[in-house]
Amino acid sequence: MTEERPVLVATEADDITADMVITELNRRDVPVVRFNPADIGENLTVSARFGTCPAPVVGQVRTPSRTADVTEVRSVYWRRPEWPTFPHLSADDSRFAAAQVRYGLGGTLYALGGPLWVNHPLRIAAADYKPAQLVLAQQLGFTIPPTLVTNDPDEAREFVQAQRQAIFKTLRWTPTRVTTCR
């Protein structure tokens, strides 16, 4: 991977959208290092040194099949990766370990000054608040349809009746697991 600068693709294991992006990058002969932060450990290692010259951050992101030098990363595609949960640890130790990964791996990637991010996690976090998005869009001149955010069922009914039609959207994408009783 020394001939071309790699693209890091941080995503969950089964992400068809990321698969399509990687297929296109492969078609263009762009090196790709795909990883999921949940795989930290044997299947993902990260080493970063700070306070070195000439780059402020040097190190590597390694998977079993690929290695990327962080000083050579051209871009980072951040698409709904999962953070580790460490279920084999006690609740306190699991929270501690997960925080260390989030702030160690995440902080290292966020510190990379050169690569283009699609989409930077800190910008994703800022955009996670739909009501704030609506206000910003309106401030930028976009037309915003009548919108209600409420937990009051009567107000929701009144709003839908007044509009004659409505679309329901969640405020945030939230993975869920459906369980059934047998």
Image: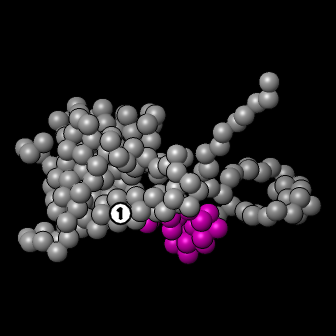
Instruction: Please state the horizontal and vertical placement of residue 117, each as a whole percent of the image.
Output: 32, 58
- Compare residues 31 and 159 and report the one nearer the observer: 31
Q: Is residue 162 visible?
A: no
Circle 1 is placed at which residue position?
104
Is 170 one of the magenta-colored residues?
no
Q: Quadrant of residue 150?
A: bottom right
Is 127 one of the magenta-colored residues?
yes
Instruction: Please state the horizontal and vertical placement of residue 103, each as a whole percent of the image.
Output: 40, 65
- Compare residues 43 and 108 and report the one nearer the observer: 43
Where are the magenta residues, as a range?
122-141
Question: What residue do we see at 31% from left, 36% from top?
Answer: 22
Q: Is residue 119 visible?
A: yes
Residue 126 vs residue 56: left or right? right
Q: Quadrant of the C terminus?
A: top right
- Compare residues 134 and 66 and report the one nearer the observer: 66
Question: In the displayed image of the protein, which residue is found farthest to the front?
Answer: 90
Is label 1 in a helix, a strand or a loop?
helix
Residue 159 vs residue 171: left or right? right
- Compare residues 102 and 96 and report the one nearer the observer: 96
Instruction: Please state the horizontal and vertical placement of residue 156, each as a whole percent of the image.
Output: 85, 59
Number of numbered labels in the structure image? 1
